Amino acid sequence: MDKLKYGYGWVLKWILAAILLGVGIYMFFAAEVVYTITGVAIVIFSLFRVVPLLKSLSKEVLRTINLIEIIFDTLIGALMIYIGVTKGSNLANEAIWSSVYRFSLVFFFYARGLVFFNSVVFLGEKTEVPKFWVHIASLTLGSVVAVTPNFDYATVGIFFLIIALLGAAYLGYDGFGGYKKYREYSKSLNEGKVKDVQKDDAQNIDKQVPKSEVIEDPEEKRPYVN
């Protein structure tokens, strides 16, 4: 069966781009959605790391420390999801949930940075330069969130909106490339070029397949009869 020269993945990519953009815009105006999405992001980041991370660490103490961090991060993310779903529009009227959200993020960023640098400095875990600077940024974000007096959901909502715009642009552009290939294939199909190409391919395959040669056994020597 011939392999298709096009696909319909561009449809899914455009739908996902529209959903991502819509959610990003909605999060900019809805505090409860920012609360919930933040929790979901933390839970996904934590749980998806468990098996690859623990399998790749060479020391038991490293596995234990990272597992403890993952457990606490998962609990924090689950708490955010619960608060965002149950409190809904009342989040803006109760200041305590803003503080819970703020210091949960502080713990998340600080814990990631501290676990990383303890693993590298004291436990001999090797790393690379980009990973080092990412965790410097993690500690910096934790400090910024902790000392910013008016930090609230709107700040994170703007960040999510930017991420959603970038993600939607990427998916839209990638989907455009897939749609372009699909239209080129449709044009070739309407012009009758696809059948010709398939016929030429079949002929080339026939030419490339070597014909089986019949090997005849040499004639057996027969005894001479006088």
Image (cartoon, helix red, strand yellow):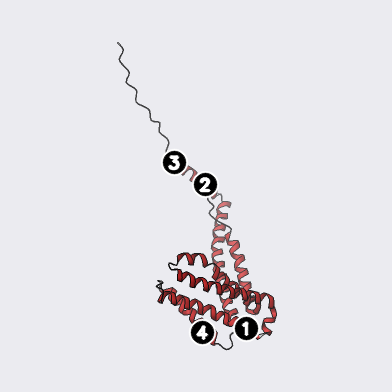
Q: Is residue 73 above or below residue 5?
A: below
Mark 4 to mark 3: distance in Å? Answer: 70 Å
Q: Residue at x 51, y 80 (%)?
A: 110
Amino acid type, callout 1: Ser
Point out the image quarter for the C terminus. top left
Q: Pick whichever, 40 or 10, lies toward us.
A: 40
Residue 207 is marked as 3
User: Few, some or many C-alpha atoms within 10 Å of disc 4 (few <14, some 14-19, many ≥20)?
Assistant: some
Disc number placed over residue 198 in the picture, else none: 2
| Marks 1 and 2, how far apart at CA | 63 Å
Residue 110 in view of the camera: yes
In space, the residues marked 4 and 2 are separated at their CA atoms by: 63 Å
Foreground pick, 35 / 12: 35
Residue 98 circle label: 1
Name the mark on residue 143: 4
Looking at the rendered structure, the kind of residue marked 3 is Lys
Residue 86 as seen in the image, left or right of residue 151? right
Secondary structure at badge 2 equals helix
